[in-house]
Image (cartoon, grey):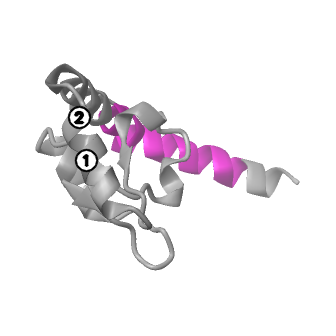
Amino acid sequence: MLLTPSRINYELLKYSECAYGGSIPIGKKPLSFGDLPNELFFEVDENDIRGSINRLFEIPYKDLEFMANGYRQWMRINRNPEYLNRLLLLQLEGAFDG
């Protein structure tokens, strides 16, 4: 699934839809994906689209399946509402401690 963030590199809903659908994320990672392992996201070289497509079609099916499953698992963990709420509370506690 081709994914691109907005002008400000913001994570959009389509990144979650890609994981839910079991698709391989292809395109550009948003800033919020800084800790997503590179092997789980196929970055497209904007200056060499054709070369990127050729590289994509050279990836063995087993590796594509690994990417899709790994991405889905990463999203399941890192975009879990309970996890995100805990992160927010920790940040708020830190903001008011000082």
Label 1 SS = helix
Which residue occupies the extreme top position in the image?
Answer: 62
In the rendered image, residue 32, in percent from the top left (x then y), is placed at: 51, 54
Left-right relation of 49 to 91: left
Give, as a single range, the part of the protein colored magenta.
Answer: 74-93
Residue located 18% across and 26% down the image: 65
Q: Is residue 91 left or right of residue 84?
A: right
Q: Is residue 75 covered in magenta? A: yes
Residue 79 sits inside the magenta stretch: yes
Residue 82 figure quarter: top left
Q: Can you tell which mark lies on residue 76?
A: none
Q: Main secondary structure of the magenta part?
A: helix
Q: Residue at x 25, y 47 (%)?
A: 54
Please tell me which residue is depicted at 54% across the width and 39% down the height of the picture. 35
Three-letter code for the amino acid on which mark 2 is drawn: Glu
Query: Who is closer to the viewer here, 79 or 96?
Result: 79
Dot 1 and dot 2 residues touching (CB under 8 Å): yes
- Mark 2, Cα crowd under 10 Å, few <14 / some 14-19 / many 20+, is few
Q: Is residue 8 above or below residue 80?
A: below
The answer to whether residue 55 is left or right of residue 32 is left
Q: Does dot 2 land on a helix, a strand or a loop? A: helix
* Pointer 2 residue: 58
List the residue tagged with mark 1: 54
Query: Whole-percent x and y of residue 79?
Result: 37, 44
Q: Quadrant where the C terminus lies?
A: bottom right
